[in-house]
Image: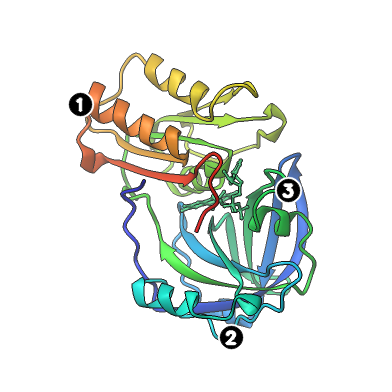
């Protein structure tokens, strides 16, 4: 579930290839993509996200016949493509963008490596320089470019989004960010306004994603009525946070952006 508004960027389908892959933390892999076509990409910062087409192992993926929009028509055209050449589409966040990188424009994507299940994460874990990808920009979920106070809450899949929002908020912003990890070793140095306190929590393997983050949220003594909130990550975390903020703290729905980034036991798509 989500109330994120999709804004189809005029850049359409952008082609790129993998430049390099580095392990950021034990369960987070950064894949940097590049290529001249990235010059058409309009970087907006914050939690900007896109639909990323990644190759499927043991097929012959083609990126030249993908639709340039992922609206209903584009999605149906995508489904009509032959399965053995059709890349898989998954949503990811722009973790960083350097228009003038060492090899031309460079864009970083941080993938949670969540195991052998799925397509995008296993692909990222072994992505090699030269691998072809493509993406369609979808815009930002965060709506409060200059807003404060802020409340950001998410799990490891939303770490790139929360880090991006903190990076791009005005330095005078205040508030709280709650980030839940399943392994404390995945904690990162995050650059952000000094007035936004970042609270890291780690969930136990037997707990549902969001258990710890939602407990911290419930324990917050006060949440300002004019807060701009962003909740993302496992579906139960995102919807649970919204329910608490709107239902129990009286925050207007319009001030709460929420998005289920993934769902336990369910493949995206
Ligand atoms: C707007 C948006 C931005 C996103 N940005 C990022 C990002 O920057 N980095 C990132 O890592 N993810 C991000 N995600 C989440 C990502 O799209 C999903 O995790 C996606 O399901 C991964 O695809 P997959 O092919 O690896 O697994 P799928 O084929 O979708 O799922 C296979 C299995 O893996 C499980 N699974 C999927 N994701 C996770 C996870 N994170 N942890 C544990 N189990 C999981 C599923 O429950 C399922 O059982 C974002 C999602 C959205 C909507």
Above or below for 182 versus 31: above
Q: CA distance from mark 1 to mark 3?
A: 41 Å
- Front position in the image: 219 or 193: 219
Depth-wise, is mark 2 or mark 1 nearer the camera? Answer: 2
For the point 25% across and 21% down, which residue is it?
248
Left or right, residue 244 beside residue 264: left
- Label 1 SS: loop
Left or right, residue 115 beside residue 245: right
- Label 3 SS: loop
Label 1 crowd bin: few (<14), some (14–19), many (20+), radius 10 Å: few
3 and 2 marks in contact (CB < 8 Å) = no
Nearest to N terminus: mark 2 or mark 1:
2
Q: Which residue does the numbered mark 3 point to in the structure image?
A: 116
Question: Residue 66, percent across and down?
Answer: 52, 80
Question: Residue 159, percent across and down?
Answer: 55, 42
Asked whether residue 249 is in view, the answer is no
Above or below for 223 versus 45: above
Q: Which residue does the numbered mark 2 point to in the structure image?
A: 64
């Amino acid at each position: 579930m989500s109330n994120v508004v999709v804004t189809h960027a005029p850049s359409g389908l952008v082609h790129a290839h993998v430049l390099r892959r580095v392990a950021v933390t034990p369960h987070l892999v950064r894949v940097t993509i590049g290529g001249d076509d990235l010059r058409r990409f309009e970087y907006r910062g914050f939690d900007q996200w896109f639909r990323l087409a990644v190759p499927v192992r043991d097929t012959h993926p083609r990126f030249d016949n993908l639709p340039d929009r992922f609206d209903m028509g584009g999605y149906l055209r995508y489904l009509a493509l032959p399965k053995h050449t059709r890349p898989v589409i998954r949503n990811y966040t722009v973790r960083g963008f350097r228009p003038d990188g060492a090899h031309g424009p460079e864009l970083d994507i941080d993938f949670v490596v969540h195991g052998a299940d799925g397509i995008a994460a296993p692909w990222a874990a072994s992505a090699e320089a030269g691998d072809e990808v493509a993406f369609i920009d979808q815009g930002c979920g965060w709506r409060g470019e200059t807003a404060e106070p802020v409340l950001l809450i998410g799990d490891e899949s939303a770490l790139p989004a929360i880090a991006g929002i903190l990076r791009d908020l005005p330095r005078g912003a205040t508030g709280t960010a709650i980030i839940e990890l399943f392994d404390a070793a995945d904690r990162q140095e995050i650059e952000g306004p000094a007035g936004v306190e970042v609270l890291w929590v780690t969930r136990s393997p037997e707990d549902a994603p969001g258990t710890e983050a939602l407990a911290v949220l419930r324990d917050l003594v006060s949440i300002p009525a004019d807060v701009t909130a962003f909740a993302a990550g496992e579906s139960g975390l995102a919807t649970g946070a919204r329910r608490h903020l709107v239902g129990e703290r009286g925050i207007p729905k319009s001030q709460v952006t929420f998005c289920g980034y993934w769902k336990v036991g369910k493949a995206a798509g």
